[in-house]
Image: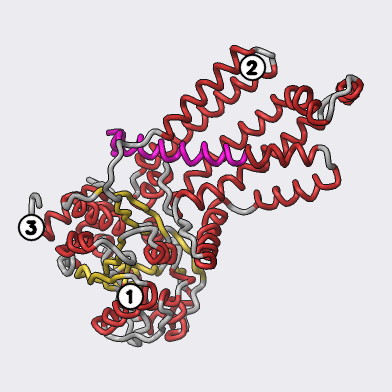
Amino acid sequence: MIWGVTIAELLRLMQAHLLLSACAVLAAAAIGLPIAIWAAHNRRASAPLLGAISLAQTIPGLALLALFYPLLLLIARATGWPIPALGFLPALLALTVYALLPIVRNGVAAIRGIDPALREAADGLGMTGTQRLRLVELPLGAPVILAGIRTAAVWTIGTATLATTIGQPSLGDLIFSGLQTENWQRVLVGCVAAAVLALVADGLLALIESGLARRSRPRWITGLALLLAASATAFVGPAGTQQRTIVVGAKNFSEQYILAGLIEDRLHRAGFKTERRDNLGSAIAYRAVAAGDIDVYVDYSGTLWANVLKRNDNPPSKEMLAALTSELAKRDGVTLQGSLGFENAYAFAMKRGRAEALGIRSLTDLASQAPQLKLASDLEFLSRPEWQAVDRAYGLRFRDARSYSPTFMYRALSDGAADVISAFSSDGRISAQDLVTLSDPRHALPGYDAVLLLRPGADPKLAEALKPLVGKIGIDAMRQANWMVDRDKDKRTPGEAAKWLGTTVEGRGGG
């Protein structure tokens, strides 16, 4: 165990991170080097080509990763091919695009930088263009080309931490989950491990580069052998098994990590092997289960109602669950197995003293005071239909509105950076920080029962294994589990909170 991270988890994530990065750099080199050679000999084409590649580089890494998800979904639907839109493939494509620029730019510079007299000498010896490239240009330009690959490798290893947002395991899992749960040791382990991988890759490529520059065969062969040996560890898989792995999804906050851990615990005891896809956005998580990229995750009825079915009415909870069960099955083949037993609704919350001083008890009261107040929301809320419904119903116009990760949203309220937050009703910090939630007299916000969703055609044994969780998690137990992770002192990991929750709701010490 290293600062709350087990050795097995760290090695698994380092291996996944290395595999993704190595494949992306290899793919970028395989694509970029021929492009560089061609562009180096075609000056007219090189400027627009390098401009286009540079343009791709200006797209933020997180956005580039996210954009490949809907693109692959669209291609899969149009062609009918079983293209995985979540996980390794979109991450590989995005990182490959990201790694192209230094490889192409250095490749062009390496070939164009060769002394023209050497080219003339090669031509004078009667070499063909291919022979001149193979025997003169590439050997002399190799150190500069390697420098581009070094830069691409370091960039790729750093950017690969973002792949966790589209369901690809990487060292970003530690960083993102650590940020959400304020487990800074977990963040540090993820950062240090990624830095170590980048430094090792850079050092080995530097050894090869210097060997080529000095014409030292032992030096570059040693560097290449060590690099290949290190890369080979990324491809070493666990002992083969014919049992299919169940992929458990989770969004990017503490409750989701805990519930995903609880589901994994149930499945392990039922004999299933599992994998996790954490830190998914709401839209990506549902599309992933509908596409079969994940097998099971927990979502919330109001989120599905407003964001998936695009409904803006607000029926009672039972009617909403019945309609969701029917519509999701008919539309996408997704099974709504049932409510877990608690609700995690959106609720506007304020510090008790501040709310009492301003006489605010409801969203109606808030509307009259909003122009002098600052709102902090989670990263999704202000772009969701629920916010539009609240805005239509109450006409809220805040002095300032900013988005934060859920953890920092509560911090913003506690340190005065915000007056109101879009809280979650099952969050243990509401009572711990003595917050009051404002009533919604016009019923703009729908109910948010936590529900289990299963992929189309899910194994009936999977549904059977998860059945004991349906209707068994009360709001008090969920708040307590959330607070175990979110509190500042005596913090527990989401895995520990999941085990506590499992023991509590199932009344067990085992099976």
Amino acid type, label 1:
Ala
Closest to the observer, 340 or 44: 44
Which label sits on residue 507?
A: 3
Mark positioned earlier in the residue sequence (3 or 2): 2
Instruction: Specify the quadrant of the image occupied by residue 287.
Output: bottom left
Name the residue located 36 percent from the left edge and 49 percent from the top edge: 177
Closest to the observer, 506 or 69: 69
Label 3: state its secondary structure.
Answer: loop
Q: Which residues are magenta?
A: 1-29
Q: Percent from the top left, x then y, of residue 253?
A: 35, 57
Closest to the observer, 130 or 410: 130
Name the residue located 79 percent from the left edge and 23 percent from the top edge: 136
Q: Percent from the top left, x then y, of residue 159?
A: 53, 44
State how far apart marks 1 and 2 are (Cα): 61 Å
Q: Which residue is mark 1?
A: 329
Please state which of the two labelled residues, at mark 3 or mark 2, is closer to the viewer: 2
Q: How is the image coloured?
A: secondary structure
**On the rendered image, what quadrant is the N terminus found in?**
top left
Closest to the observer, 65 or 90: 90
Please state which of the two labelled residues, at mark 1 or mark 2, is closer to the viewer: 1
State how far apart marks 3 and 2 are (Cα): 64 Å
Q: Is residue 397 above or below residue 157?
A: below
Amino acid type, label 3:
Gly
The kind of secondary structure the magenta stretch mainly shows is helix
Label 1: state its secondary structure.
Answer: helix
Q: Is residue 28 magenta?
A: yes
Q: Which residue is mark 2?
A: 211
Mark positioned earlier in the residue sequence (1 or 3): 1
Label 2: state its secondary structure.
Answer: helix
In the rendered image, is residue 221 in sight? yes
Mark positioned earlier in the residue sequence (1 or 2): 2
State how far apart marks 1 and 3 are (Cα): 32 Å
